[in-house]
Amino acid sequence: MTTEVGSETEVKKDSEQLGPDKAKDNPEEASETPENQKSRETSSEEAQDSSSVPAPTSQSSPSSQKEEKASPESKGISRFLPPWLKKQKSYTLAEPKDETKKRTTGEQQVVEESECQAPDRVAQPQKSLEEAAAENQHNAKADDKEEKHSVSSAETQPAKEDGKEMEVEKVAKEKEEKQTEKEKRETKEVQTAEIKPESIPQKSPKKIKTVQCKVMLLDGTEYSCDLEKRAKGQVLFDKVCEHLNLLEKDYFGLLFYENSDQKNWLDSSKEIKRQIRSLPWIFTFNVKFYPPDPSQLTEDITRYFLCLQLRQDIASGRLPCSFVTHALLGSYTLQAELGDHDPEEHRSDYISEFQFAPNQTQEMEEKVAELHKTHRGLTPAQADSQFLENAKRLSMYGVDLHHAKDSEGVDIMLGVCANGLLIYKDRLRINRFAWPKILKISYKRSNFYIKVRPAELEQFESTIGFKLPNHRAAKRLWKVCVEHHTFFRLVSPEQPPKAKFLTLGSKFRYSGRTQAQTRQASNLIDRPAPYFERTSSKRVSRSLDGAPMGISDQSLLRDFPATGGQAAGDKIIDIEAAGQAKLREGGREEDGSPVKTPQLELTQDGKSNSLRVDGENIYVRHSNLMLEDLDKTQDDLLKHQASISELKRNFMESTPEPRPNEWEKRRITPLSLQTQGRHATRAEGPCTGVSDADKSSHETLDIVEEKKQAEVGIEETLVVDETNKGKMQVATDAGETCKVEHLSKKDSSSLPSDSSSSSSSSESEDEEVGEYQPHHRGIEEVIREEQEEEEDMKRKEHEEKIQHVETTPEGSKLNVPVEHTQVTAEDFVQENAVTIATEEKNLSEEIKQDLGEEKEEEQLKLNGDVSHVDIDVAPQIICCSEPPVVKTEMVTISDATQRTEISTKEVPIVQTETKTITYESPQFDGSAGGNAGVLLSAQTITSESISTTTTTHITKMVKGGVSETRIEKRIVITGDADIDHDEALAQAIKEAKEQHPDMSVTRVVVHKETELAEEDEE
Amino acid sequence: MAGLGGGSAAFGRCTHAVVRALPESLCRQALRRAPGPEVDFARAEREHQLYVGVLRGKLGLQVLELPADESLPDCAFVEDAAVVCEETALVTRPGAPSRRKEVEAMKRVLESLNLNIVEMIDENATLDGGDVLFTGREFFVGLSRRTNQRGAEILADTFKDYAVSTVPVHDALHLKSFCSMAGPNLIAIGSSEAAQKALKTMQQMSDHRYDKLTVPDDAAANCIYLNIPSKGHVLLHRAPEEYPESAKVFEKLKDHMLIPIANTELDKVDGSLTCCSVLINKTSEL
């Protein structure tokens, strides 16, 4: 274990680091599998994203540790560096400011090193090229002063999140340590991941690549600027907002179009170039979240832009309204832009220059003029307000429509809005799912699914599937849903899915401020109302309609020198770099290849992280089951392949079925017992039973992830020495249990760590699956609507996810929440790969590592009984039925303080003060042999300097009709050198004993990774 | 100003009412879902006159009374022939073929009021006004034997400002056979299973949360809410003699001016209170 400064983040990093290290250590594995490479690339990309990453921390080498202490930024690299490189290291220390550069070089070297170690890696030149290109860019960036400047400015404002990553040093300094750490980690990963062909020219540093961006503004004007090529979306967005003098900017966003009609929101936390696939860079500044009550906006200028947006929406027909409303809104527009009606000046046709409606008639114009006269005396701001007061009541106000088909192939529209998801057939609303009603949102390939809370009197939630035109559309819809849910329903953004361990799928999360946060921030706006000129909507009207901005605009294209290939956009072109860039882009273009994806995600995560830090997201809770790219496997997983493949097969088979698509029925009958039985047989994959417990304080982060059997194999590794018999009443008779629950709870303290994770998701298409489970915590008070039913069962505050699976008679008495997610084994595999490759959280990672391969373990391992199991409080129920066992679990997370979980008596619920991860994995035949069922629970407690992970492994065996359950618990304490391991250990044991008096400690392992990386066993 | 109903404050505002006299053919030829006792035409007329009298005399509305048409036995149920919201009137295409001609007179009278008229000319569309519940915020359209999806779509196209949600209606003639608005945010709903199911659907479909007033009798849940400037909340509901238990429920509405109206005869041919009038809020402007 590395002894680092005390934040949890660090711990995570460590764990993450471990991953890469591992990779190094076992070059063969890594190199041989394509998936490995992918993962590596991913990590490398991550590193790129966090260009600002300070030198990586080296855990293994003593010298590096020193460095770490001295400056966190410089951590990590040293370890990877061969002795001959050490100079650089020191150099780095000496000149922190140049770190970026150095690091780059360091990376390169590292890369080389890696090459040496594993020539196989070179096998994928493309990727390596990409990386190299990225590095080059990085260099360029470092050189670019403008960049720095912008960055620095960004830093000053918490709101501006971008650029942090870009500038390592500054960020590092200003940011909290965790971020730094994170960056470090990223760096590390990069190192491991990077494979570089010798050909990579790294010497090109001096050139700064910039790309010209054009942004079409709401008033029809165009804003253009040059951006450093690796700039993140936030940089551009901030520039635009600054240009507009807009402070309440969270409602807005930048759109870009692909294929002319597919609009995509630019993710501000990610690099632009990774999102927009072609040049030129043309964006449209638009309202992203329509405030339900515009009168609550603080500034008139914000309302003004909202008005402009709505005028476009209305004139283009996107926002339908009646004749009367057209006329009324038009009249307010005139009042705002022209002032009082002046008979002299405003003659007959003054109106026809404006466009008020898609089909504007003479009659309408007359009506507008007539109404205009009645507004005499209204100031422009008042007229805008009136405009908004009327516009906001339109039924389609703020509804983002997506074409889809229902399960029967009928064309419908899915509308995402502040309150939830609306389903339209033609113009008719045929269903509606308010956010509180939705337990989970996911997509897989071109399918989009929502899991809906059971209706009254119903026991099971149902999953409703929709078919989107293609995968991208499905993902786009999913993202929009995630963003809207977060923005309108949560008090603070969720953290990106943290645990890689059991998760698959996109890690995308909305990283901006929520409405609640932006309102709060707006209250602090203290400036005189800014003067702004209202441009005539005449101009606007011309550019209306659908996809604004002429991507086809020739002038724009002209602006960009055709520099060949993809690199054309770069004004300054390093030839080599350009070439690389091309390569990279080419690779990218194919799909968002897996590689890319991870990068994006990382970036984002980092971003979100920073956000959180800035903001006060003190609590984050999310339960996600994320499914990610399939197909990417890591070496680690190889062992489990066999079992996985089997699972996969099962999965595939089962997949089609799971979707109860009859959304039309409004409630689909949830999986009934019978169904479940089936599922079990099929090896229903990952199930997410999430129950979030919120803390009232909101400091809890609950994550529950359930996984499939596929994971079981992995988890088995975790098996702990300790056995506690009789403790577990949960019995899985059948040898196969499919679910793993992963509960994690976090405190505010743990937040930082959470943020750090996220490597795998990306925008690329690779992600075929994404899941998102909305938790409504902050707002719950406000919304009680549909939650009552379940709330009883759970804590009042958090309903979140309960899934009930009835598998067995036993199950009936127990509340068994089961989510059936369709994650294919592939996904699972992928996830693992990802997980390993890019690490996120300390705990989770550690766990992962442990699971995946135990080599990396550090820290103290305590094998003993379950330390924090609250049997009473949170009863988890695991029911096992017959041979095909379906396990259902309820995972409830509660604060240590407040426990109202739903747990079943039998299943131990692990509570951690900070983070609890519980997963239950049933064993399936293929894996692990004899045990009937395994329940694992892992809980992690993270504090500032220490993180404790407890994994519980429950095995139930049936012997001759007698079932016996063993609970094996392993507690891993990870922390800095500073912490008192002994004390921590003692405490952990004590707690465990309190809960399980009869448990015994079988083994204590102290693993120190310090300079010497020594390991002790006690 | 007219915009979008002006929120709940303006809900129930009404200046004009269109009614139609009862044809004698109603007694024998009016459509009915189930055979039942014969209509006492004289009594039916008295009740109807009382109804019109309340609108005109007590509430001060301008009542436009169309003459009866003996060839149209159901013509008194004018509600089905038109949906009027603010300044726009949708002239429907009633689901029962025998009633299609009822709309002609309705269209003329609406034109005389200078409303924006939209006609439902699609031959695949059917819509009875009795299936249209306007809450002040949105429309619910019952998909019944009389109203189909296409009719609902046309309604949605006509009133673009509002969400139009569809509600399956079973075991009842119309959506409003068991529910109606009893206040700006208050839905009166019957107790039958069909009514409760429809209510659930409506609740799910709406972004808004309505209060509900549950009455024991479905037929009694059909009432007429008006917001008359000089009188405030006015509610016309079925008389205690008809539905004593339901009347008790209405009597708990303290803020409402309650006007019991007997409707015993038309009830026999599935006529309810709202069926017999089209209420229009004609603002002087516009």
Image (tube, coloured by chain):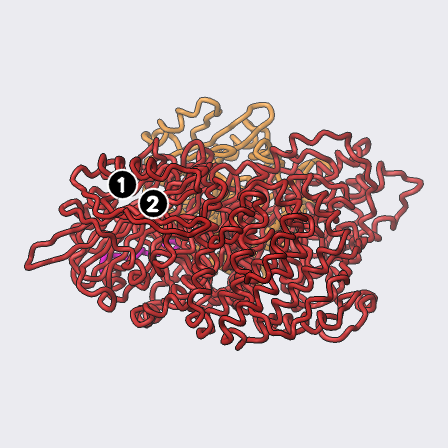
Chain colours: A red, B orange
Farthest residue, direction right: A344
The percent position of residue A583, horizontal first and vertical second, equals 65, 74
Which chain is disc 2 placed on? A
Q: How many discs mark residues in the rendered view?
A: 2
Residues in magenta, as a range: A666-674
Q: Amino acid at mark 2?
A: Gln
Q: Residue at x 34, y 34 (%)?
A: A896
**Residue A161 drawn at (x, y percent):** 64, 45
Dominant secondary-structure state across the stretch colored magenta: loop
Alpha-carbon neighbours of circle 1 within 10 Å: few (<14), some, or many (≥20)?
many
Same-subunit check for callouts 2 and 1: yes
Q: Are marks 2 and 1 in contact (CB under 8 Å)?
A: yes
Q: Is residue B46 visible?
A: no
Residue B34 visible here: yes
Q: Quadrant of the N terminus of chain B?
A: top right
Residue A867, numbered circle: 1
Residue closer to the observer: A542 or A199 = A199
Of labels 2 and 1, earlier in sequence is 1
Percent x, y of residue A650: 30, 70
Q: Is residue A794 left or right of residue B101?
A: left
| Front residue (pair B38, A60) | A60
Q: Is residue A670 magenta?
A: yes
Residue A542 on image: x %, y % = 80, 57
Residue corresponding to mark 2: A939
Disc 1 residue type?
Ser
Question: Please, what secondary structure does the residue beneath circle 2 have?
Answer: strand
Q: Which one is nearer the viewer's eye here, B154 or A227?
A: A227
Is B64 drawn above or below residue A1017 in the view shown? above
